[in-house]
Amino acid sequence: MNSCASATPVTDDLRVVYESRNRAACADRALVLAAAEIPHQVVHDAGGSVIVAPAEYSARAIEEISLYDEANPPIVPKPRKVIRYQKAMPGVVAYILVISGVAWLAGVSALGENWFQAGRVDGVLVRAGEWWRTVTALTLHSGLRHIAGNLIFGALFGLFAGRILGSGVAWFAIIVTGAMGNLLNTLLLESAHRSLGASTAVFAALGIVAGYVWRAKLMSQERWVYRNGPIVGGLALLMYTGTGDENTDIGAHLFGFVCGFGGGMLLTLAKDRILETRWQMLGGIGAALLIVAAWSIALLV
């Protein structure tokens, strides 16, 4: 056993006034006693440390330590929130089937229609009220490389969204915020703007995850880097995967992310309900109906 004596002589009649397994805690309280000019010793052994003081000073020593403890309560870390991960694969599979199916239908000009002309975003026509184009354009692609990239990143970000929100709610939110991103991009650009592709919805999915995780505080809140990690991470992925070459519609990617981020934050208002089976079913049905309705109008107009 090792002991560390104070500068003030200590008698043989000693009383334990504090003990802890944490040597640093004992050292802090020894400084308090030293400042109060109370004789004491700190004794260390394999089990921890104790502070002893002469019997006539023990009551005062205990009082000083108690006052110190009251003024410096221990920092208790906030318990981490438990994330109830949901089944995300049904939504990912549905996404792949829809994108692939529309690509095939458009490629063979099904029903004798030009699907690209009927479904792409056209600034003039969208401003004239053809809102459905903001939805149908999310399912169209200009080539194999275009569709492959959106299938990969869409499945990945959609998987993340489905894991925390459930497939039904996640994909309904992705379609709605993706369409809103297309709408904003069209309204803020020249009226002749034309575009197509699921990338707006892909980055809406990324935004939803970032906004929901950040607003619901699903990550540790003790440090800035963790507290704002979802925002920083989302923006980093947007910059890395969404800026591409001169053919990339950066505005659509940005507005998709922004709308998705806002949608993710709004979903936290109902975070205790959206995981219920009925809301997942309604979300899935709503997502399917929205796509079918938009394409039905597009092909009939």
Image (spheres, helix red, strand yellow):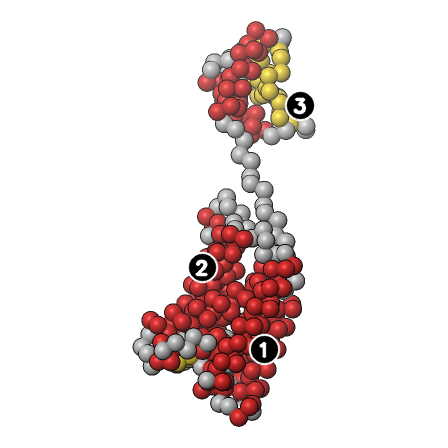
Amino acid type assigned to the residue bearing label 3 in the image = Met
Q: Counting other residues with Cα less than 10 Å from the Cα at mark 3, is it few (<14), some (14-19), or many (20 or more)? A: few
What kind of residue is marked 1? Answer: Val
Q: Residues within 10 Å of mark 2 (few under 14, many from 20)?
A: some
Classify mark 1: helix, strand or loop: helix
Q: Residue at x 50, y 46 (%)?
A: 221
Please say whether residue 196 is visible from this viewpoint: no
For this orientation, the residue located farthest to the left is 190
Q: Is residue 133 above or below residue 172?
A: below
Q: State how far apart marks 3 and 1 are (Cα).
A: 73 Å
Q: Is residue 219 above or below residue 254?
A: above
Report the side of 39 relative to 254 (left or right): right
- Say which quarter of the image contains residue 11: top right
Q: How packed is label 1: few (under 14 Cα within 10 Å), some, or many (20 or more)?
A: some
Disc 2 residue type (three-letter): Gly
> Depth check: 175 or 204 in front?
175
Residue 96 shown left or right of residue 206 in the figure:
right
Residue at image x 38%, y 80%?
125
Please identify the quadrant where the N terminus is shown.
Answer: top right
Residue 1: assigned label: 3
Q: Depth check: 7 or 188 in front?
A: 188
**Residue found at x 55% / y 9%:** 57
The answer for how far apart the CA atoms under marks 2 and 1 are is: 25 Å
Q: Position of residue 55 (x, y in %)?
A: 60, 8
- Which residue bears the numbered disc 1? 98
Task: Return the mark for residue 262.
Answer: 2
Mark in front: 3 vs 1: 1
- x then y, percent, for residue 257: 45, 65
Mark 2 or mark 1: name the one nearer the start of the chain.
Answer: 1
Q: In the image shown, does 89 or 283 lie closer to the viewer?
A: 283
Residue found 58% across the figure and 77% down from its top: 98
